[in-house]
Image (cartoon, rainbow, N blue to C red):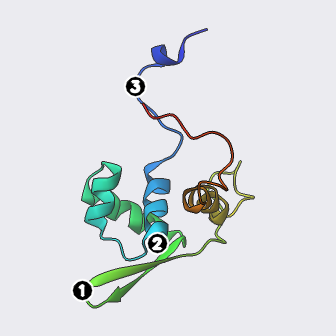
Amino acid sequence: MSSPRSSGGQWTFITNHARVLLRIARDPEVRLRDVATGIGITERAVQIIVADLEASGYLTRIRVGRRNRYTIDPTVALRHPSESGHPVGDLLGAFLHREDAPASESAGPPAAHS
């Protein structure tokens, strides 16, 4: 059996699509430039992801003056067949609820930072 470090490359459990959606859920008026900086990808990559999410019905974009305001539809099912029974709102809720919970309500010990 190989160790996790020997599998090569860096990978994460959460995709950039999920990261963009989570960032927009936190701030529906966020600039895509700020999303890109926060996630560590290019602004063009964020634009493509937002277009994907919009085309798939996960979010809508409304122009307000010189800015965009995004609205997420939490009822749209996740895309992969093994998760298609869950709406994207479940994913958002898992992350956003935990971030918004006061310290006294959070379950378990605080996460270790490296």
Q: Which is nearer the N-term, disc 2 or disc 1? A: 2
Mark 2 or 1: in front is 1
The reply, left or right, for residue 37 in relation to residue 2 is left
- Please name the residue shown 33% across and 89% down the image: 64
Q: Which residue of the protein is positioned furthest toward the bottom in this rendering?
A: 65
Q: Looking at the picture, which amino acid does disc 1 mark? A: Arg
Residue toward you, 23 or 51: 23
Assess disc 1: are there few (<14), some (14-19) or many (≥20) residues with their C-alpha within 10 Å of its C-alpha.
few
Residue 21 at x, y = what percent? Answer: 48, 62
The reply, left or right, for residue 111 in relation to residue 80 is left
Residue toward you, 13 or 79: 13
Describe the element under mark 1 as helix, strand or loop. loop
Q: Looking at the picture, which amino acid does disc 3 mark? A: Gly
Mark 1 or 3: in front is 1
The reply, left or right, for residue 100 in relation to residue 16 is right
Residue 75 at x, y = what percent? Answer: 67, 72
Assess disc 3: are there few (<14), some (14-19) or many (≥20) residues with their C-alpha within 10 Å of its C-alpha.
few
Q: Which residue, given by chain and number where applicable, does mark 3 sit on?
A: 9
Q: Which is nearer the N-term, disc 3 or disc 2? A: 3
Mark 3 or 2: in front is 3
The quadrant the C terminus occupies is top left
- Please name the residue shown 62% across and 57% down the image: 91
Q: CA distance from mark 1 to mark 3?
A: 40 Å
Assess disc 2: are there few (<14), some (14-19) or many (≥20) residues with their C-alpha within 10 Å of its C-alpha.
some
Describe the element under mark 2 as helix, strand or loop. helix
Q: Looking at the picture, which amino acid does disc 2 mark? A: Glu
Q: How many marks?
A: 3
Residue 57 at x, y = what percent? Answer: 54, 73
Q: Which residue, given by chain and number where applicable, does mark 1 sit on?
A: 66
The quadrant the N terminus occupies is top right
Q: Which residue, given by chain and number where applicable, does mark 2 sit on?
A: 54
